[in-house]
Image (cartoon, rainbow, N blue to C red):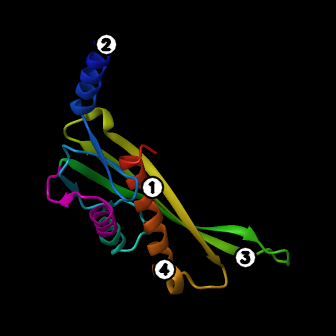
Amino acid sequence: MYKKIAVIVLCALLSGCSVSYSLSGASIPDYAKTFSVQYFKNQAQLAGPTVSQTLTDALRNYIASHSRLSLTDAGDLDFTGDISNYTITPVTATSSAPAQSATTRLSITIDVTYTDKKDPKKCFTSSFTRYADFPSSQNISAVQNDLITQIENQLVQDVFDKAFNNW
């Protein structure tokens, strides 16, 4: 008799709520069918005019290809944010006189607000920063697009992990 009760209780508990997992290991609630990514505004002084659009598109594409969610204008899960910092700074100096920078760093910070319209406990607001270094002997305009793509890919992965992998 106790076995039957235990089986019934276990079945009831397991059918109460569910979460689905994707091949990426993402934990996406079953109730979520859609997502939206609002345009990331550029609040950083040095960021070029295309950074906002490429970052927004990269996040949309990554979520669409790594989850079962469909992109819409007002999704069950919503991402908003902006580019808050974009800096180019010297990192290491040469040993020769006069001292010069041997490596330069491009850093990008984004502020993201994630809203789960059905489960407010999962909502968050966070800042994410990533960077890429390049030789100071190179002109930033020659390497900037590749560095931005590299940094954006890392930022998108960070946002996805925080939202869907409980990271």
Which residue is the site of mark 4? 146
Q: Label 3 amino acid? A: Ala
- Placement of the N terminus among the 4 image quadrants: top left
Residue at point 85% right, 74% down? 95
Marks 2 and 1, how far apart at CA: 47 Å
Label 2: how many Cα within 10 Å (few below 14, some 14–19, many 20+): few
Disc 3 from disc 4: Cα separation: 19 Å
- Magenta run includes residue 107: no
Q: Earlier in the sequence, mark 1 or mark 3?
A: 3
State the mark number for residue 2: 2
Image position of 45 with respect to 25: above or below: below
Disc 4 from disc 1: Cα separation: 19 Å
Which label belongs to residue 158? 1
Nearer the observer, disc 4 or disc 1? 1
Find disc 3 in the rendering and name its residue: 102
- The CA distance from mark 2 to mark 3 is 72 Å
Residue sitting nearer the eye, 44 or 119: 119
The amino acid at mark 2 is Tyr
- Badge 1: how crowded within 10 Å, few (<14), some, or many (20+)? some
For the record, the magenta segment spans 57-75
Q: Does label 2 or label 4 sit earlier along the sequence? A: 2
